[in-house]
Image: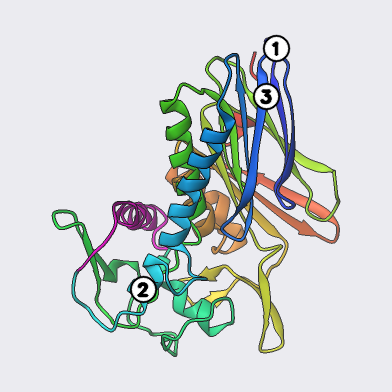
Amino acid sequence: MSNKILLKIIIFSFSFLLISCNNNSSYLISGNAFGTIYHVQIESDKKVDTSKVEFNISNIIYNIDVIASNYSDSSEISRFNNLNSTNFIFISHHLFKLLKKANQVSDLTDGYFDITVGDQKIKKGFYINPIEYVKGKNRGFNYKDIILSEERRSVKKKMKNINIDLSGIAKGYAVDLITNYLISIGINNFIINIGGEIKAHTDNEEYIKISIDDPSKKNQSVEDIFLNKKAIATSGTYQDHVEYKGNKISHIVNPKNLKNVSDLSRLVAVIHDSCATADAIATGFIAMEANDIVNFANEKGIALMFLRENNGVVEKRYSKKFIKYLSEKD
């Protein structure tokens, strides 16, 4: 059995410990972004200009944040949301790619991932935004009413008060950009973690062990997963919730009925080559009825794990594609 790089990820507190089993030098870059913490662990047998790498990683994250943040009125997506127009608007390269990827995942998830639920988050207190949200269940729009023009690199919305929310894909997209950057400068052994959206990469056949912790019990893991050159993204209802009309609700909106998921004890983890894709799929699937999640993942050929706590016991379900990541490879 080959030596393994061991990574312990505590997804819910966003901290981790990496233990290297080789003689490479190890570098850790950390910071704050997207309302969470990020860590980039690099291993290399060559000297790394950490100041330069840290600057470039921070710049990548900053650029996506100023494009995709719903918490800033000056972000590119907020400016688009607040436009009182249904005309095509020229947008940045990264915003176009984010919107295009979002539409692809929306099709894949049969509309359960839908970036047009932003108005519902405003309505229920997750975002503050001057745009008037659409009242009632029959708003008359969904993700298909965001129209992209590849030729003009532009976008339009069919209704003026459509409000796009990219929180379910932006962190994963940033992970993919950092992955491409590190590989482009010859760094091939790394782990990127932005708030639980993770890419594990080595330049050989070694696998990285990722331990997902029980959110209700500190420092106690509920599952070990083995990855290389793969991303894992999670979506959970444990953390981000508000009280609405006397009930606690999560930030996850089911676009089919516009209700927020009220079960505050569930987690979906998705493995994919692309962290942006995994991020968006996890966001979409967690909005489904619990009993449908794994069956639908099997139908779509998606590597997915579903966790839910019930009276102190963690229930775990896996899609067929996910099971191979549960065993250590030789």
The numbered mark at residue 23 is 1
The amino acid type, in three-letter code, at marker 1 is Asn
Q: Is residue 218 above or below residue 257?
A: above
Q: Residues within 10 Å of mark 1 (few under 14, many from 20)?
A: few
* Residue 204: percent from left, percent from top: 54, 14
The mark total stands at 3
Image quadrant assignment for residue 224: top right
The numbered mark at residue 26 is 3
Residues drawn in magenta: 89-113
Q: Which of disc 2 and disc 1 is earlier in sequence? A: 1
> Quick check: 98 left or right of 264?
left
Residue carrying label 2: 79
Q: Check the image and name the residue furthest to the top.
A: 1
Q: Is residue 162 magenta?
A: no
User: Disc 3 on helix, strand or loop?
Assistant: strand
Quadrant (top left, top right, bottom left, bottom right) of the C terminus: top right
* Residue 83: percent from left, percent from top: 30, 79
Q: Is residue 111 magenta?
A: yes
Q: Tags 1 and 2 in contact by the CB under 8 Å rule?
A: no
Q: CA distance from mark 3 to mark 2?
A: 41 Å
